[in-house]
Structures are given as C-alpha cells and as structure tokens.
Image (cartoon, helix red, strand yellow):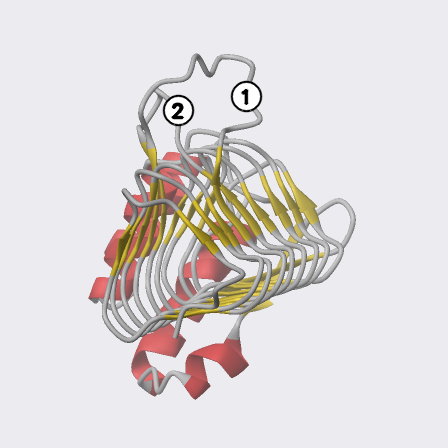
Amino acid sequence: MISPLAHIHPDAVIGDNCEIGPFCFVDANVVIGDNNHLMNSVTLLSGTRMGNDNTLFPGAVIGAIPQDLKFRGEETTAEIGDNNTIRENVTINRGTAAKGRTVVGSNNLLMEGMHVGHDCFIGSGCIIGNSTKIAGEVVIDDFAIISASVLIHQFCHIGSYVMVSGGTRTGQDVPPFCIAAREPVAYCGLNLVGLKRRNFPTEVINALHSAYLILYQNSKLFNERIAEIRENVMPCKEIDYLLDFLANSKRGFIGK
C-alpha cells in the first residue's frame, strides 16, 4: 500500500508489495525492491538503491549528498541490502568520486539517530547503536556490534565480531574478535560472549586468545610478533583473517 500523502517521483522504481506511509518522499533515480516498509516521513533521495524486506522508521534519510567539500555533484549511490531495520532519524549519505558508493549489507540493525558517512562499507549482521556517528570511508566488517554514541574517524576499519563500548571514540582500526573500550580507546580482551553466541569452536577461541596474548602482551617488534603468531598459533581461517587485517591496517590498530 502506498499512501496518497506520499510523494513518489514517476521515475522511481518501486518493487512489489511495498508499504509506503504518509509524507514519505521518494526521489527520481531511486530503485527499491520488494516487501519494503517505509513508515511515515521517510526520505529516499536520488541514488538510493535498496533490496528487499527492509523496514525504515520515521525520519530516516537515505541517499543525501555527502557532507564532504570535495563532492562536486558526481553520480553516486547509497546501496542497502536486504532485511535491514533502519530506525528513526538514521542518515546514510551516498558516495563520492573516491569510491562511488556507500554500501550497507543485509540483516543489520541501525538504531535511532546514527549516521553513515559517504563511501562507507558496512557488512552484514551488524548492530550499530543510537547516535553513533561513522565518518566517511569507514569499513565495518560482518557481525560487528557498535554500541551507542560511538565516534569513528574517517578511513578506520572495524573488524568482524567486535564489541565497541558505548561512548567510545576511535581514530584507529579495531581488530576482529575483540572488545574495544575506555578513553582513550584500548583493547580490552576477546569478545568471548559474542564468539560463544556465534558458536565459535573452543579450539578457535583458544587460538585467538593465544594470538592476542602475543600481539598485546609481547614487547617484540610488530613483525616479530606476527611471525610468532604464525609459528606458534593453530592455523585457521580466523587467524588468517586477523593477520591479514593487521597487515593491511592503514591507520594503525588500537593499543592496550
């Protein structure tokens, strides 16, 4: 059902069985899939691309131009996957020439008032808390949990299965599988509760624990610590992912 009080541009493409409430605004150059529910006063601006089965609460604004002074009106997109819950007043800006698109995957919960900056890539299965602000070109991997009122600096990389504590601010990468908290932000141990809830095998958790002990409790040079992890810790895809994450970190990763 589409409310007669909603404004739908004739060039917008709306999938089957969508519910669009009163005072919604759907711009030209917008494509949304099937079974989406837009509550009242949702705004989808030019460049928005949305999959299926998403629910958007009042005041959400998707596809607004970036808050980046380098933006020159280039054609870019804000791409949303499937089965996301996007709560009140969430804003997701579209991309710039840097990457051309902002991407939010599937099965995410984006809570009230949070912001996704231009050219961000957010994976799937993430939970991002109220009023959290994510600057441009941030990458958040799958199944990350970012608590409320977190500030994430431009270009940071947040690993999978992390728990970032409420009120934290970070200007560095947060490695996967860990808890990040305190002021200034610091490594606070493995995210054991999250890993157990996701049914990680005990031997994998033990391997990650051993790797992080070497990484944070060892006074050797970084390359020596990485070599020690490769030599002494049980090989598995999670350890490979952790080592690749560290090797590719451009802003450095959080300390202890």
Percent from the top left, x then y, of residue 230? 26, 53
Q: Residue at x 56, y 14 (%)?
A: 69
The N terminus lies in quadrant: bottom left
In the structure shown, which secondary structural element does the residue marked by tag 1 occupy? loop
Q: Residue at x 50, y 58 (%)?
A: 6
- The reply, left or right, for residue 109 in relation to residue 239 is right
Percent from the top left, x then y, of residue 4? 48, 64
Which three-letter amino acid code belongs to the residue tagged 2? Thr
Dividing the picture into quadrants, the one containing residue 223 is top left
Percent from the top left, x then y, of residue 5? 54, 61
When the figure is inspected, residue 138 is found, relative to residue 211, above or below; the finding is above
The Cα–Cα distance between marks 1 and 2, rounded to whole angstroms, is 8 Å
Circle 2 packing at 10 Å, graded few (<14), some (14-19), many (20+), is many
The residue wearing badge 2 is: 96
In the structure shown, which secondary structural element does the residue marked by tag 2 occupy? loop
Which three-letter amino acid code belongs to the residue tagged 1? Asp
Please report whichever mark, 1 or 2, sits nearer to the chain's N-terminal start: 1
- The reply, left or right, for residue 35 in relation to residue 147 is left
Circle 1 packing at 10 Å, graded few (<14), some (14-19), many (20+), is few
Nearer to me, 248 or 21: 21
Work out whether residue 248 can be spotted: yes
- The reply, left or right, for residue 85 in relation to residue 247 is right
Nearer to me, 79 or 208: 79
Q: Are marks 1 and 2 in contact (CB under 8 Å)?
A: yes
The residue wearing badge 1 is: 68
Q: Residue at x 28, y 68 (%)?
A: 52
Q: Residue at x 39, y 67 (%)?
A: 208
